Image (cartoon, rainbow, N blue to C red):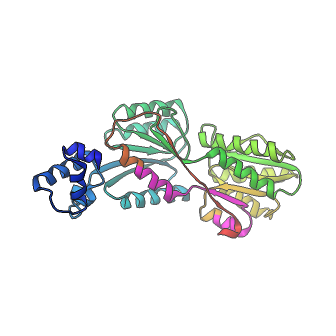
Amino acid sequence: MAALARAAGVSVATVDRLLNGREGVKPDTAAAILAAARRLGHPALARLAPSDPGALPTVRLGVLLHKKGQAFYRAFAEAMTQAAAAHPGYRIDLIMAFAASQSPTEMAALLRGMIGRCDVLAATAVNHPDITAAVGDVQATGVPVFALLSDFALPVRAGYLGLDNLRAGRMAGWAIALAADGPGTVALFVGGARWHGHEQRDAGFRAYLRARAPRLRVLDTAVNLETRQLTHDATVSLLAHTPDLRGIYVAGGGMEGAIAALAQQRRSGQVALVVNELTPESRAGLTAGVVTMAIATPLQALTQALMRQVTAVAFAPVQAGGGQIVLPADLHIPESV
């Protein structure tokens, strides 16, 4: 109310009387407060002009995600749409696009392609110099850029929203150490060498097992490009050539391949499997006893937090660096689905 009062040139008490429907506010004063609220994009517009949808400030939110065909990204897009529609006090128009690959060149082009089309931009992307340069170009136009799920463009980007990925890796290590029957070998898959979040999960996973379960030896990290087939073939090879295999952690996408391979080889329960995100495939794997635990991003909470960030910065100067909004992971085990 203080910010709105300053912008309108009135007292906080006057704004309070108007917002709460009390008498004593002149029509011209009320009009000045409404005009100030429109300039600021202030959420009080929802109360000052509730019957006039056009009075709500509009924020154009650009969203860039990966692989539209994957169930997780489809669920993410749906949660984003619902959060934008439900956010109070603003009209949030989504401009959404999907990258077909992890290529930094492709994502950098998509980032720059949003210039002039949105007021705020949020994306999933690898951490690469081309991405950092593109984020800098976008923010130079006055559009803040937020990293989602896996951080990138540090410290250029405006902020990060997602899990504490180092902690997620430690959770995976805990689950596999608990489930593993005796000493042996553990495999780890990441989507790519440039995913900052996957690097953190890798580090957390190894650190936990090194300190708490030294009986388990972690193999060199395998890159699966978040694809089902690569993960499937690599898992089949592991099962054939690693007789003491005790666990597999798929820190990014492609878990469907590991689930299918373990089910086909009838190794359910013999090899602990921890995966990333709850999808129809991982849910079925949990139910069948193939998946030991799924570490999932709370998409509803994340998208709602993003909308709050978007409306907070849409009408403010861009500031690089920003902070982090770290959400607690949702943990799913066979008995919880």
Q: Residue at x 56, y 43 (%)?
A: 150
Q: How many marks?
A: 0
Q: 290 or 27, which lies in front?
A: 27
Q: Residue 161 at x, y = what percent?
A: 51, 47
- Asked whether residue 179 appears in the rendered view, the answer is yes
Q: Is residue 111 left or right of residue 48?
A: right
Q: 32 or 163, which lies in front?
A: 32
Q: Is residue 226 left or right of residue 145?
A: right
Q: Is residue 107 above or below residue 275?
A: above
Examine the image and state in which quarter residue 86 appears: bottom left
Q: Residue at x 19, y 50 (%)?
A: 33
Q: Is residue 184 left or right of residue 171?
A: right
Q: Is residue 131 above or below residue 290?
A: above
Quarter holding the C terminus is: bottom right
Q: Residue 176 at x, y = what percent?
A: 77, 54
Q: Residue at x 45, y 60 (%)?
A: 78
Is residue 219 rendered magenta in the image? no
Q: Residue 254 at x, y = what percent?
A: 64, 52
Q: Residue at x 77, y 40 (%)?
A: 220
Is residue 302 rendered magenta in the image? yes
Q: Main secondary structure of the magenta part?
A: helix
- Asked whether residue 74 appears in the rendered view, the answer is no
Q: Residue 7 at x, y = what percent?
A: 22, 43
Q: Is residue 201 left or right of residue 266?
A: left
Q: Which residues are magenta?
A: 283-308
Examine the image and state in which quarter residue 53 appears: bottom left
Q: 150 or 168, which lies in front?
A: 168
